[in-house]
Amino acid sequence: MEKIIKDLNTFLSDLNVFYRKLQNYHWNVYGKDFFVLHAKLEEYYDKVNEQIDEVAEHILMLGNQPLGTMQDYLNNTCIQEAKNEKIKDCAIFENIIKDYETLLKKVTEIKKQADEDNLYATSSLMDEYISDYMKILWMLNQSLEK
């Protein structure tokens, strides 16, 4: 159980840093696809915000303490923060594809461990995220096709 809690807290950290990154990009995007990407980024960070709450509450349901400070998140994340600067749409796509791939890898690892530990609620939650991230990645990659 200790490993799954550590992994869930790392995932929680990733989600929190990714949330800030998406919001930063939402504020700083520019380029010909501004209107579309501005709205899409808000959709993404709203969904990530829901996932943050789900994961934290899930850790509590397992009888453990979720990480809760920005310092905790920064010390435990695999996601790199965004710079506070204007950024073009193509750079945003490249960065968030990489981040969604990181999240997908993490939730797949958590699912495998949850199945081994017979933590079916955890496994089921990860199934939802795997499906969500795969669809988002497919859509993002489609947007880069020429």
Image (cartoon, rainbow, N blue to C red):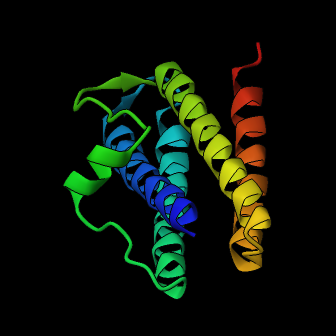
Query: 83 left or right of 48?
Result: left
Task: Please give the name of the residue rendered at 78% of the width and 36% of the height, measured from the top-left corner.
Answer: 138
Q: Which sits in the foreground, 110 or 56?
A: 110
- Does residue 38 sit above or below 71 in this rendering? above
Query: Horizontal and vertical percent for residue 57?
Result: 48, 81
Query: 2 left or right of 118?
Result: left
- Does residue 63 sit above or below 55 in this rendering? below
Query: Horizontal and vertical percent for residue 40?
Result: 55, 48
Q: Quadrant of residue 1?
A: bottom right
Q: Quadrant location of the C terminus? A: top right
Q: Which sits in the foreground, 76 or 21?
A: 76
Q: Quadrant of residue 113?
A: bottom right
Task: Please give the name of the residue rendered at 32% of the width and 42% of the height, measured from the top-left corner.
Answer: 24
Task: Please give the name of the residue rendered at 28% of the width and 46% of the height, measured from the top-left corner.
Answer: 74
- Does residue 98 sit above or below 45 in this rendering? above
Query: Horizontal and vertical percent for residue 124?
Result: 77, 72
